[in-house]
Amino acid sequence: KAGVTQTPRYLIKTRGQQVTLSCSPISGHRSVSWYQQTPGQGLQFLFEYFSETQRNKGNFPGRFSGRQFSNSRSEMNVSTLELGDSALYLCASSTAGTGGWEQYFGPGTRLTVT
Amino acid sequence: KNEVEQSPQNLTAQEGEFITINCSYSVGISALHWLQQHPGGGIVSLFMLSSGKKKHGRLIATINIQEKHSSLHITASHPRDSAVYICAVYGYGNQFYFGTGTSLTVIP
């Protein structure tokens, strides 16, 4: 089975722009979660989608949004980029949901905001 | 306030040593995960625990729900075990809370 894929792997954007990141889960997985990792804050939970519905959301401003398609692929969008949004963005998929189910992580998208 | 505390933050060991990484948490949880992150960013899920003990090869993870504490043990450590180990709990507010990670270096 193919693993979780994320595109693009690297991205450089300018402050004020917006960005869309994509995540394709393992075939058969219906849950996709997104995480932000920075040197200062470590890993933080952004949100989780299950069957095209946002099920849980972390403590991030509304500039961070996401969606999930009927084939379980997910996108996250960050609008009005700030320098502090520079981070590694990871997605993970699982068969059912977060928490009590094993998470399979993608390689991440490294976003640099200048 | 950190919901998840890990110790130690950094650990250097000689090849073959027995290693223990500790995780304490302050929220109610339904599951605890141990993750491994190698340089370059890729994260692998090592264990998911809700009670007791699990073992995969040289890795052992335990959890004590009453004491809100988990440990990850590596027996006969090897340089390829060098990585950052992250404790994550899923609980209050249906969210994941992450520890800051333990950076392990195993010297040949």
Image: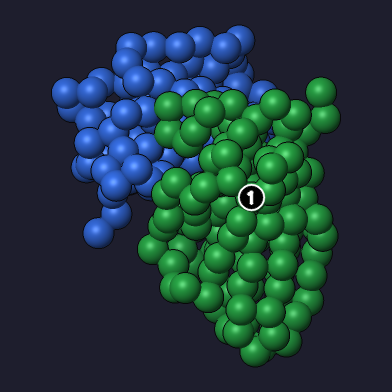
> What kind of element bears circle 1?
strand
Residue at the left extreme, as displayed: B66
Q: Name the amino acid, label 1.
A: Gln
Which class describes the residues within 10 Å of circle 1: few (<14), some (14-19), or many (20+)?
A: many
The chain that appears green in the image is A
Q: Residue at x 61, y 56 (%)?
A: A67
Is residue A43 depicted above or below A65 in this figure?
Answer: above
Coloring applied to the structure: by chain
- Decide which of B34, B107 is in the foreground and name it: B34
Q: Quadrant of residue B90?
A: top left
Q: Quadrant of residue B91?
A: top left
Q: Residue at x 43, y 27 (%)?
A: A100
Q: Position of residue B2 (x, y in %)?
A: 29, 54
Whether residue A97 is visible:
yes
Which quadrant does the N terminus of chain B fall into? bottom left
Is residue A27 depicted above or below A13 in this figure?
Answer: above
Q: Indicate left or right for B90 with B1 as reference.
A: right
Q: Indicate left or right for A5 with B50 as reference.
A: right
Q: Position of residue B6 (x, y in %)?
A: 37, 42
Is residue A49 depicted above or below B33 in this figure?
Answer: below
Q: Quadrant of residue A10?
A: bottom right
- Decide which of B72, B12 is in the foreground and name it: B72
Report the chain holding disc 1. Answer: A
The chain that appears blue in the image is B
Whether residue B11 is visible:
no
Which quadrant does the C terminus of chain B fall into? top right
- Residue named by callout 1: A68
Q: Residue at x 37, y 28 (%)?
A: B31
Q: Position of residue A112 (x, y in %)?
A: 71, 74
Q: Position of residue B19 (x, y in %)?
A: 48, 25
